Amino acid sequence: MASHKGRIAVVTGGASGIGLATVEVLAKQGAVVIAVDRDEAKLADLSGRENIHPLLGDVTDTNTWDKIVSYAKSDLSGVPTLFVSNAAIVTVGSILELTDEDWHQVLSVNLMGSVYGTRALLPGMIEVGGGSIVLMGSIDAHMAEQGLAAYCASKGAILQLSKVLAMDHARQGVRVNCVCPGVTDTPLFRYHLSKADDPESVLNMRTDRNPLGRLLAPEDVAKTVNFLLSDDAAGITGALVPVDAGLSTSFDFRSGEEWGDMA
Ligand SMILES: NC(=O)c1ccc[n+]([C@@H]2O[C@H](COP(=O)([O-])OP(=O)(O)OC[C@H]3O[C@@H](n4cnc5c(N)ncnc54)[C@H](O)[C@@H]3O)[C@@H](O)[C@H]2O)c1
């Protein structure tokens, strides 16, 4: 695996779940990683760890982005050339249930966070000759999940944003890809699960429905992000990369024993 030695990375939502696993993988691969999160308590756990620089901030606040750029310049003497826009929130509800406030919150974190972040970091990447960006999509970027109207809309927008960014900035040496995780065992997933009438049976159903027969671990996604950011993926831009245990591949997956009965 290609090393990230000498590179500065920014990962949003870096204190939990997929973001935290990504911070850890990138740091292990030699990147100096700025882990941005609004959760001060979780961020504190990252203090003092090799190659990891926790930074308290909110991705919807442009001041946070100014702070990140100046921190990289003054404290790390460089420009971030790797960016993972990962922070997101989920609000459960159909269009008739969600309020304007719900829509604004979801779109401002899940979509505008990526817009502000890319707008802040892209100029530096272009100036130094290139960089690599991963926007965190979801299986919900291209498939519908009932009761998640705002979340699905935000992730669909992220998918298209990734593709446009990839085309607009390809000749400036910046690659942009969209990773689309399936059901991944993180605090966000557990929160969504807790909203179900019968969380245990939903968990079993979600696990069984995955062709690989298990939930994804945050590391499964983080390793794919790491690959896409690295020079090993130098030929990949504008891609939608599912990391979903096969879930989006088939509309009607059955385990071997079951389809044997149908043959
Ligand atoms: N877990 C899944 O099943 C799953 C599936 C598909 C896609 N995803 C995507 O993966 C990404 C990470 O999700 P996760 O499951 O690891 O979630 P998580 O809740 O475990 O972690 C998200 C982190 O983002 C931070 N955050 C939220 N809003 C923020 C803001 N405004 N500013 C700064 N930080 C903020 C939270 O504090 C948290 O630490 C998200 O983009 C999510 O949509 C997750």
Image: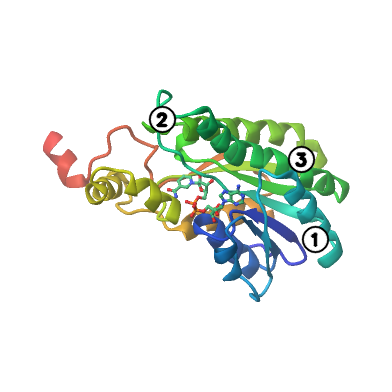
User: Residue visible at 43% across and 31% down?
Assistant: 143
User: Residue visible at 20% across and 46% down?
Assistant: 256
User: Residue visible at 38% across and 46% down?
Assistant: 192
Viewer-nearest of labels 3 and 1? 1
- Apparent side of residue 144 relative to residue 227 in the rendered image (left or right): left
Q: Closest to the observer: 100 or 163?
A: 100
Secondary element at tag 3: helix
Give how far across and how far down residue 17 sits, in percent: 49, 58
> Which kind of residue does numbered mark 2 sit on?
Ala
Way the structure is coloured: rainbow
Viewer-nearest of labels 2 and 1? 1
- Cβ–Cβ below 8 Å for labels 2 and 1? no
The Cα atoms of the two marked residues, 2 and 1, are separated by 39 Å
Residue that carries the numbered disc 1 in the rendered image:
71
Quarter location, residue 49: bottom right
> Crowding near pointer 3: few (<14 within 10 Å), some, many (20+)?
few
Residue that carries the numbered disc 2 in the rendered image:
144
- Apparent side of residue 247 relative to residue 24 in the rendered image (left or right): left
